[in-house]
Amino acid sequence: MPRSSEGTFNGVIGTTYKDSRPDWPKNASAPAGSPNVVFIVLDDVGFSDLGCYGSEIRTPRMDRLAAGGLRYSNFHVTAMCSPTRACLMTGRNAHSVGVGIISEWANGYPAYQGRITKKAATLPEILGDHAYGCYASGKWHLTNMADYGASGPHGDWPLGRGFSRWYGFHGALIDQWNPELYEDNHPFHKEPEAGYHLSTDLVDHAIGHIRDHVTSSEAKPFFTYLAFGACHWPHQVPDSYIKGYRGSYERGWDVIRDERFKRQKAMGIVPELATMAGRNPGVDAWEDVPADMRKLGCRLQETYSAFLEHTDNEIGRLADFLESIGQLDNTLIVLVSDNGASPEGGPTGAINMRKHMTHEQETVADALGKLDTIGSEYSFSHYPMGWAQVSNTPLKWYKKDTHGGGIRAPLIMHWPAGITARGEIRTQFHHVVDIVPTVLDCIGVQAPKIHNGIEQLPIHGQSMRYSFDSHLAPTNKTTQYFELLGDRAIWHEGWKAVVRHKKGDDYDIEDRWELYKVDEDFTETNDLSHSQPDKLKELQDLWWQQAEEFGVLPLDDRESERAREFLFASKRSRYEFLPDMARVDRFLVPEISDRSYSITSILKNLRRDTEGVVFSWGSRFAGFVLYALAGKLVYEYAYTESVSHQMQTDLPIGDASIEIRFTRKGLNAGTMEMFVNGAHAAAIELPKMWWTYSTTAGLTCGLAGVPLSENYKPPFRFQAGIERVIVEMADDGGDYREAQAWTVFKQQ
């Protein structure tokens, strides 16, 4: 007799239970002795930044994991976060699964969908079929931004791709002090308490997920994915950590880089005969950097180091918890950075990085006036690219580049029950696509050929388990391609061909390929392209073959411009928002840049003492808010964390219609007026405004989300009634909006 939705029923059904025999569905199970699995992903941390990779930065807990396991010195990732995470989740190449670039820059071609194809089951989907409990905390960045809304669709959120629980964030970066978070399948409103920091919160949730799992499913293994926002900018960390590095970097980036290089050689991370790559273009000798820039740069680097040390401490808390419940020995911990260190801070770095990068350049003098805010909730900082080059010691270039500085990453594997080596280094070439097959090999299961009725792509990676037992074993890989934003590279049997593509150049005519024997030239300093043109041609041809095989094409060197089609395709001219709704993500709010618009709030039962936020859009770094306080109705526009514009009027009593009306009078500038029940009440001139998507936070109605005004403390809930808030937009302006708004996405 068929079992209607549970497969075939193999029991017997008689007249009563006495002459019948039941048949229970067989539950999935993991192979005996299967290890737990923990992935720890660092963000924008360079090859040399960990103490066990040569750094002066204090990372004792990660160093302890390395001392109890293995470090890999020839491990590679993609040059940006989403593609690396797609490889890490699937064991397939990023383009093949639709994530050849970060999710915000999807362009509609198969390789660039901003989400993982269902043809590639993720590791939690695979492990879930073998009775693993799967839990995620932290950065996801594998969902197309069109799907960030509370109503989804949620199929590409973590719970849609195999995890049972998720606490974290979409997108590339996040405010560590005042984050906008999600829990499972909905936006989550966090009200940070004193001493709050996101990294601590993420580890608390990772520990909580594991605690719940072992309490209810002690016999089943678990997979925990912990992806920090650290150390992507903004670099934000408790001041006590920053003070621990005060004065540590006054000798400058040339000296620190040289010291790291010497330690790397002494450790065996870098071959003894390796030569350090020269300074990248745009990085001056430290002695030639003006004194004020040196002062700023040192404080920014101190903060970065403190941020990483703080993250290390949180990783230690997780390891301690695993040990306390007797699970550390049989847990395979994989710790990796998603790409090389970021040069986005430019020559000087910045305290308000979003403003500096997307709106108007911050001067060194301005930054020095706010030096003591660096790392606090009043900063959104990033270090100069000279310090990013130190992070990538001894390699050339950075994140987004397919040279070593962008793609060679630290990798630590710790599994006392399965790895007998302690504190050893492995030099075999490997890539992030090799992690999933390694995990499956350690567990003893295979990736499915069909998952949920969908035929699956083959796993592209190779298991690294063979390397656990021998540093002498040759790599089992022969070829690995790389591509990002037109930069291309290919590694093949110890050789590497690479091109750093200049945006807008012809790929065939203007690109200049380089050739390195990287199994002898660790730092890619001896270019053999002129002396061995035949070998270069062989590798170039092989790159194109790989591009066809793994679906890389079409090449696209555009960055944030790719997002324009989504941002302006389906926007309405009228929106309505309701009180206590879920937060609207900043990429999904009405597009009001460089155009006239009105925001009308229909309020009920106002009293003289009514207080609270009617609506809030953005944060103290860029945004605006309407709130009632001390008998006044106040509109405040935050231009920066230290500059705001306000207008106010007496708070009406009873029911009222409050209109905030902006009239465009110039390039993203104009007059903001307030009308109460149709009567003019106040006005201010706004000489320069932000474009919509460069705000650092989304939109809330009836309460404050993240801090915006210094005149109240979130959540500052509105104490009267809100019927609705209506946003209506005119069709004036727009050339500036569509030509420039895409620049906000350079921040990723």
Image (cartoon, rainbow, N blue to C red):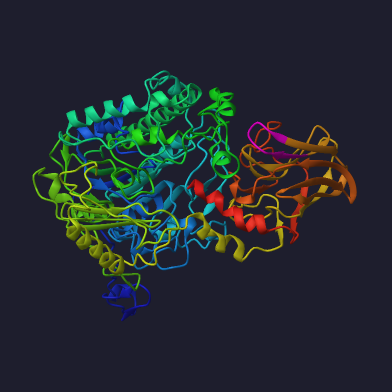
What residue sits 44% from the left and 40% below the top? Answer: 232
Between 634 and 398, the residue placed more toward the observer is 398
Residue 178: give x, y in percent of width and height.
Answer: 55, 37
Between 336 and 581, the residue placed more toward the observer is 336
Quadrant of the rendering where the N terminus is positioned: bottom left
> Residue 705 is drawn in which quadrant?
top right
User: Left or right of 284: which side holds 513?
Assistant: left
Residue 562: give x, y in percent of width and height.
Answer: 50, 60
Residue 236: give x, y in percent of width and height.
Answer: 49, 32
From which residue to which does the magenta span run?
635-644
Residue found at the far top of this picture:
247
Numbered-mark total: 0
Q: Is residue 458 magenta?
A: no
Residue 58 visible in the displayed image:
no
User: Left or right of 294: which side holds 577?
Assistant: right
Compared to residue 96, the image places residue 399 above or below, namely above
> Residue 138 is drawn in which quadrant?
top left
Residue 505: give x, y in percent of width and height.
Answer: 42, 58
What residue sits 45% from the left and 60% below the top? Answer: 114
> Residue 275 is drawn in which quadrant?
top left
